[in-house]
Amino acid sequence: MKKQLLILSFLTVTSFQLIHAQISDRLVPHLGYIFTQVNMEGVDEVENGSASYAFNTIGIGSYVVLKHHNDFLSVGVDPSLQFGLNFSNQGRLNWFAQVPVFLMGRIGATATPYNTQKLGLGAGIGVINSYMNYEEVRGLLETKQFFVNPAAMVEATVLMRGSTLTGRVMFSISPSTHEGDLFDPNGFFLQDRQAKFGTFGFGLIYGF
């Protein structure tokens, strides 16, 4: 499963390079910070458990304009690559990676590279590919899981001195179920139980 995420990451970076070479006048690239929370909920006929994990991530991506009207209204696709870290209560360093891909529409600022309006709005639907490697206690409490969620995203943009600052919120529409590790409400470890995984994230991205 880790290999799947690495392949997705490689394809995303390669796609950025190919797209930039061929349609650079349609790209609206961005770089920024996204606070991401992974929610894991147990699904078991005997016991249920849940846990949440927070990661500070840095992401890079680009909105690719597919169609537009007078540089004011557009539709396009927005792939990103995000990577984040987290320290557990035991001081262990954990990591997390995501590849969100959205089909979206934009109006106003960032609708195209040539839009010069002060404000902009955007929304989209797509998928979020995630991999979480979280170990709280070595060999006992750990979760290493790849999961994919259908997702939605909304954003608002302000143009400032030639660059843009965008507030973005993205969230999974429905969880995906996998065999994994989880915690019950009392903190006891339940091994190899089915669990539902979903994500929620918000942050600021800088357009350049």
Image (cartoon, rainbow, N blue to C red):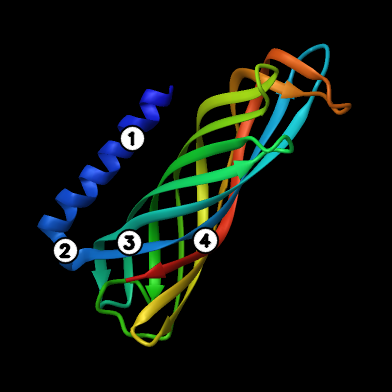
**Residue in front for this viewpoint, 144 or 156:** 144
Q: Earlier in the sequence, mark 3 or mark 1?
A: 1
Distance between the Cα atoms at labels 1 and 2?
22 Å
**Residue 91 image offset from top left, x and y in percent:** 68, 38
- Above or below, 170 against 180 in this view is below
- Residue beneath disc 4: 154
- Which of the marked residues, 2 or 4, is nearer the chain's N terminus? 2
**What residue appears at the point 51 percent right and 55 percent down from the top-left corner?**
153
Give me the C-alpha separation between circle 2 and circle 4: 24 Å
Is tag 3's residue or tag 2's residue first in the polypeptide sequence?
2
Q: Which residue is mark 1?
A: 8
Q: Amino acid at mark 3?
A: Val
The amino acid type, in three-letter code, at marker 1 is: Leu
Quadrant assignment, res 44: top right
- Hey, which residue is sitting farthest left in the picture? 22
* Label 3 neighbour load within 10 Å: few <14, some 14-19, many 20+: many
Q: For the residues marked 3 and 2, what is the alpha-carbon distance in whole angstroms?
A: 16 Å
Disc 4 from disc 3: Cα separation: 14 Å
- Residue 83: x and y in percent read 46, 45
Q: Quadrant of the C terminus?
A: bottom left
Up/down of 125 relative to 53, above or below: below
Q: Secondary structure at mark 2?
A: helix
Secondary structure at badge 3 equals strand
149 lies left or right of 42: left
Mark 4 lies on a secondary structure that is: strand
